[in-house]
Image (cartoon, grey):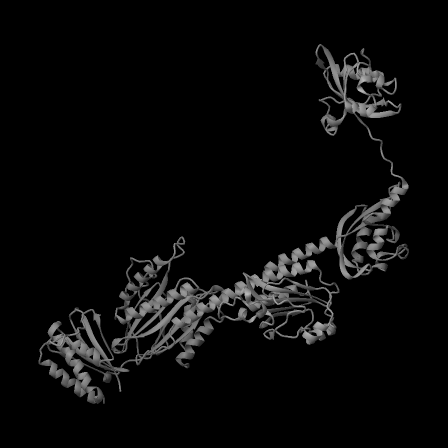
Amino acid sequence: MGPVTTGPTDEPRDTPDTPGAEARREPFDAAGDAAAVVSAGGLVVAWTRAAEDLLGLPAADVVGTSGLDLLATPGDRARAVAVAERCRSGSGWSGRFPVRHHDGHVVDVDVRVSPGFRVGQEECYLVSARDRPSPWVVGESVLNGFLTRSPVGMAVVDRRLRYVWLNDTLESLGGVPRGQRLGRRLGDLLPGLEVETIEGLMSKVLETGAPVTDYEYVGWSWSDPHRQRAYSTSFFPLVDPDGTVSGVCYMVLDVTERWTARRLLTLVSEAGTRIGTTLDVLSTAQELADFAVPAFADFVAVDLLEPVLSTEGHGAWLSDAGPALVGAAMRRAGLRSVRDGCPEAVARVGDKVDFVPPPYDEHLLGEGGPVLIPVLDPFDSRWAAEQPRRAANMRAYGLHSLICVPMRARDTALGLATFVRSRNPASFRPDDALVAQELVARAALCVDNARRYTREHTAAVTLQRSLLPQALTGGTALEVASAYRPADPTDGVGGDWFDVIPLSGARVGLVVGDVVGHGIAAAAAMGRLRTAVQTLADMELPPDELLAHLDDLVLRLSEEQPDTGGAGFLGATCLYAVYDPVTRRCTMARAGHPPPIVVAPDGQVSYPEPPAGPPLGLGGLAFESAEIELAEHSLFGLYTNGLVESETADVDSGMARLADLLSRRDLDLDTLCSSAVRDLVPQQQPDDVALLLARTRALDSGDVFSWDVPVDPAAVADARTRVTRQMAAWHLDDLAMTTELIVSELVTNAIRYAEPPVRLRLLRDSRLTCEVADASSTAPRLRHARSTDEGGRGLFLVAQLAHRWGARYTSGGKIIWAEQELP
């Protein structure tokens, strides 16, 4: 081929540098195309099977001949020579060439020619080609069939929004015949749709010429008047050749299934935020009913098995209960209707029910799935015979579709939820049953959580109340009253406690404390601490020493807790006070607890503040005692921080309000105590509240008789004589002999083994107490003497004669005491 110059009719020539060349070549995949190898002289060197199929020429007839002979027209030869020259220079080429088929017809092909390459000593080119399909021309009949039979509803309205054309699909969607639509507006035909909005959108398209796509709406149509359907509609203008908008075409697609699925998914998702907001079984059941009406059903009843509502036992139904669940005792826990007063209901909340829809399965509650009755027939013999009242209500209120779903969680049968439709004309479908099952499953889990929490909370409250004192008495020294309010159930039971402990010598111990945390663990810890305080108080320890021993106990309890990264730390606060009615002195110590409150007989209020001391459980820090004198009839109050602290008020204002409330003198002690708690804490709060009030009394001087005893064995006889005379003065002649013996033994021991001074004191209050004080700190020891021993029976004899006896230590020594019951 010689070099030629191509004219302006040549096809565009792409080179690697031409913008878009690679993009245009990308779809042209030569892997399956016809291909040939042509030499620089224009001879065909190789011919593929695909080339044979394309032109109908076998390789034997083509190889060795000139490639120009394949061109359809002689005029294309010059173009072919120019292409060869281009490719010889190292550039490729692609374009269109007409070639002649073996049978004589022309085939218009897309051709690609590679840059030159050498085969042996000769330069060659790879030529690939594919058939260029002829453009398809849509006939008018095909176009009309496409528009008319399209699965998408289509219509055209004029500028006055009157129908001028619609296809078959739109006619079937709306249920209005074509003849009745033409020349009329949408609002005249389908009032159940959002007519004003839709026509407003069409008017907007006419005015602006801008299309509106995928507008969704719901409504009723004549084609399905008993079910609400959803549609997606797009509007676009029809423009004349002169650019004026002559009408609107709109396309309608029924998207009811998609819309329903989305709505139900939204419903189920929203249920997670609106069901189970409290840890209360009845509230959760009612939340399920409230949520489902009217979004899902027109009437909902939630019935729970009685053990689920009970706070006793575990309430779990065994899997083999089977027939026992048929007619099992249930109570209505939730009820809701679109009608005021729920007139459809046969039973009210709290009533006993045994409803299982016929035909029932004996395993419905324990193992069964949702029961779907799309169409209720109140005249069905099973309803008429087994549920006559419900059948009558079905007829009266038009109940026409029902779903019953058993409530189960963690392999425990809880009850049954029933969903009914009446005003909503659409019957429940299988998809609705799945949604109802999901709603009930969420509610069942919340009910089970509430049930478990309620039982744990009830157990904690029961434990706590059993550990608190059932009756308080301050003897003749104090008049006492107490008030306790547990924390809000959602926050769990706290560890507040209080106690009044009778001590020797007519004294009384008062204690109030608060364990950190909530729940059964806090209540159990509170019980252990209260028991420890009683034990330590019985050992006659002074307040500061008692708190030191209590601190050691809390440290040991903390070490017993599981290692949870510090969460096992057990802390507590406490205040312990001892009141002596003889001296009217009150000794107290506190461990991180609020100070007591004292209201004098004249109404003046004070907050004596013994050294605060560290909270119990820190260890290594000392506690200090303080002593105050209380006038007779003073009011002494101990409380926990929940009484004076709140989210809306600080401690100072709370203590000021407490002082005002306790200053009232016109109320008896019990009323004063309960009213103070009620006024300060009108509602339950996150912490327990405890208040212990004590009104002081003083022991009359005539009920106290004491004197110093010389350290002389002869003084024992004098002590016995004095005791006998005092018993006669107190009209306690029945106790004269035993008191004489007790005093004789105690004084004798003090003279023999103790250090002076020795002092004897008799106290008469609720009991008769004999006390012998000495300067020795040696502890007395009760011995069991043998029959051959000459001594060692003194304290044993005292223990037999007295109601109780013991010893307590003072700053100057010790006191041995013995108490007797008064006749």
Q: Nearer the viewer, residue 206 or 657?
A: 206
Judge left or right: residue 718 versus residue 643: left
Let me know if residue 647 appears in the view.
no
Residue placed most toward the observer, 73 or 608: 73
Classify 689 as above or below 738: above
User: Could you tell me which residue is drawn at 71 percent across and 56 percent down?
Assistant: 260
Q: Is residue 607 above or below residue 264?
A: below
Q: Position of residue 673 (x, y in %)?
A: 41, 76
* Residue 612 visible in the snapshot: yes
Q: Nearer the viewer, residue 105 or 806?
A: 105
Task: Tell me: residue 80, above or below residue 601.
Answer: above
Q: Observer-nearest residue: 741 or 546?
A: 741
Q: Who's the residue at 22% across and 88% down the image? A: 734
Who's the residue at 21% across and 79% down the image?
Answer: 800
Drawn side of residue 494 relative to residue 202, left or right: left
Image quadrant containing the N terminus: top right
